[in-house]
Each structure stands twice: as C-alpha cells, then as structure tokens.
Image: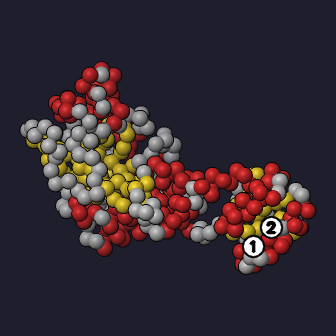
Amino acid sequence: MSCDICAPQEKGYTVCFSDKQDAQRLLSYFNSLPTVNWKRIDPANVWMIESIFFDFMDYAEAHLGERHIVAALADVRKPLKYKTPLKPIAQFKQEREASWIDDVIQNESIATHYQPIVSWTTGTLEIVGHELLSRGLDNEGKIIPPFKMFEAAKIRNRTFSLDRACRITCVKNAEAVGDKLIFINFIPTAIYVPEHCLATTIKLIEKLHIKPEQVVFEVVETEQIDDVAHLKSILNYYRSHGFKYALDDVGVGYNDVEMLSNMEPDFVKLAMEYTNGVSQDAQKQHVAKSVLTIAHNMGAKALAEGVEQEEDLLYLADMGYDLFQGYYLGKPTAAPATRIGKNAVS
C-alpha cells in the first residue's frame, strides 16, 4: 500500500488523443512550455505535469472535442504505465476543484480548536481534558470546515497527508491544555505502517516534553472498520509508547462486543446520535446502557459526546457515565475553556 506523502508534490498525467490531428495541432501549444513540464511520447500521447494538465483542460474544452481525449495518472519515467484507468479529461474537473487542499497541507494552514471534556463528581462539573479539533484556513484566514478538507483530500488521494498535518498541528498546540488530557483524532485507514507513519508525531511529543499519559489518540472512522488487525496494530503501537486511546462513535461503527473487547480502549465514546435526546428515548437509553456496560466491563471510561441538553447530561450521569462532551458544556473554541459554560449545571 503506497503512502501519498512520499509521492511527488506535483503529479503527472498521460493524455491520449484519439484524433491524431488534435495532437499535431497542439504541438505549438506545448512547444511554448518548458520541456521539463511535458513530454511527447508518440503521435497520440503526451505526458504533462498536473498544473499544465489543468490548464490544458480549459484549452481542450474551448478548442477541441474533449470527449475524444482521455487521460490517466502516470509517472514521467513510465508514461504508458497508468496508475489509474483512462477516463475523459472532463472527469478530472473534480480533482482540479479540490486541488486547493494541496496548499492547505503544504503551507500547514490549519488551526486548532479546543472542546472541553468534563467529569461529573458528586454533582460538580470539572474540565479534565480537551479534544483538539482541526480547522482549515483559506487564503483570507477564514475557517474551512473539517468535512470539506477531508472530502477534498480524499479526491486528491491526500488523506494521509492531511490527517498527519492535522495531528502534528494539534500536538504543536497541545501546550495550551496544560496538564489535562489531550484528545487527538486520527483516521486508521490513513495509517499504513505505524512505525513509519506515526514516527514524526511520536518524536514531536517527546521533543515538546508532553507526558505520554496525557495523550489520548481517538479513532475517527465514519465507515465500518474492516481490518481489525490493522487497527489493533496501530493501537498497540500507541500504547507501547505510553499513550491512551479512545474509540469514537461507539454504537454506530463498533457493533461487535467481541471486537470492542479486543481493542481494549481506555475510553469509549457514545455516539452523539444516542446522547442527544436520550432522556426521552427508550431505544437510545438501551444503547447508552449497553455501551456503558461494555466500557466498564473492559475497564474503560465511558464518555458521552454530543451533550446538548441538561436533561440528557443528568440522565447519563445518573446512569453512570464518567465523562461528557458537547455544546451544552462548551463549543470548540480557539483557546481552551477554563470553566464550564454558565448555563451548565454546577
């Protein structure tokens, strides 16, 4: 499995012309460009770097029958050995529109926001940690939502690079949390070999003298986990360095009790769809109780995320949940909260 961070920053494409006359007419177009940016392979095929390819798409749309032109990702050293299937160049427009994410990654245009994680002890709420959440920044410094960043990264095959950049930025900004728990997200499918992919993260934590026991790496996965053994290898790697880890969205993607037990997490986070409105919904109450039982049987702490109403907080606290997170207790902010919101129970 290849790692996209090791790939060249600028990709290349082989463009194939079914109409050789189009290819011939384009020679004057390409001849005006530096030869390091393009290469004529034969009368019907031209290789070019991505930036030239994106410009060429506009030219082809305006002056040629673009439906007769196909392209595929390819290396200049083996331009006819395609890395992706050939497809009409019009279908590459989505990649071009998502190419802004390359600049976000390259320039580390990422900000960290902090959302408090709260304990409930004898009726008193206390901030025990923060989840560090990444937000992109555009050229004007405006916030880019995380879902938009990761959608673009997926299109560009840059998920690992973005996940790594977010993780590194969070570690750099973890000092603001002080001695409290630091929850940092990671996408397991974006990590191929833990010893390689996580080396920079581990070294940075050591360099910044962050205590390993403070750090909780949180598995973020919107799809069902297919390769349990791979996920376990990542979690074992984290634990071998003294870190804790949490499983997110439990009740959605982790339906197998045996698999949950095999993961041996330190924290189990009840999915927000089962937290919101739980005080009035019998089905949600059943799921919440099941997750709580599983967590405590494993020796893990149960954390309810997505707490937006006082009655849900009180219900889950009475049920036995250990930790809580959600807008009712505090929204993500550019600096860590030092106290619970004034509307929360105290």
In this view of the protein, can residue 297 be seen by the observer? Answer: no
The x and y percentages for residue 170 are 34, 61
Quadrant in the rendering for residue 172: bottom left
Residue 261 in the image: state x and y as whole percent.
35, 40
User: Eyeballing the image, is 343 above or below 155?
Assistant: above
Outermost residue on the top side: it is 282
Residue at x 25% of width, y 65% of height: 175
Indicate left or right for 123 with 187 as reference. Answer: left
Residue farthest to the front, as pictured: 62
**Residue 46: numbered disc:** 2
Q: Secondary structure at mark 1?
A: strand
- For the question of whether residue 270 can be seen, the reply is yes
Q: Is residue 201 left or right of residue 53?
A: left
Location of the N terminus by quadrant is bottom right
Q: Are marks 1 and 2 in contact (CB under 8 Å)?
A: yes
Task: Give the mark, 1 or 2, whose residue is nearer the N terminus.
Answer: 1
Q: Residue tagged by mark 1?
A: 38
Residue furthest to the right in view is 21
Instruction: Please tell me which residue lies in front, 340 or 157.
Output: 340
- The three-letter code of the residue at mark 2 reads Val
Q: Marks 1 and 2, Cα distance to the nearest angstrom?
A: 7 Å
| Image side of residue 33 versus residue 159, left or right | right
Q: Amino acid at mark 1?
A: Trp
Residue at 56% from the left image edge and 63% from the top image edge: 4
Residue placed at 88% from the left, 56% from the top? Answer: 18
Instruction: Give the secondary structure at mark 2.
Output: strand
How many C-alpha atoms fall within 10 Å of the one at disc 2: few (<14), some, or many (≥20)?
many
Q: Residue at x 49, y 68 (%)?
A: 106
Above or below for 49 versus 191: below
Closer-to-camera residue (103/32): 32
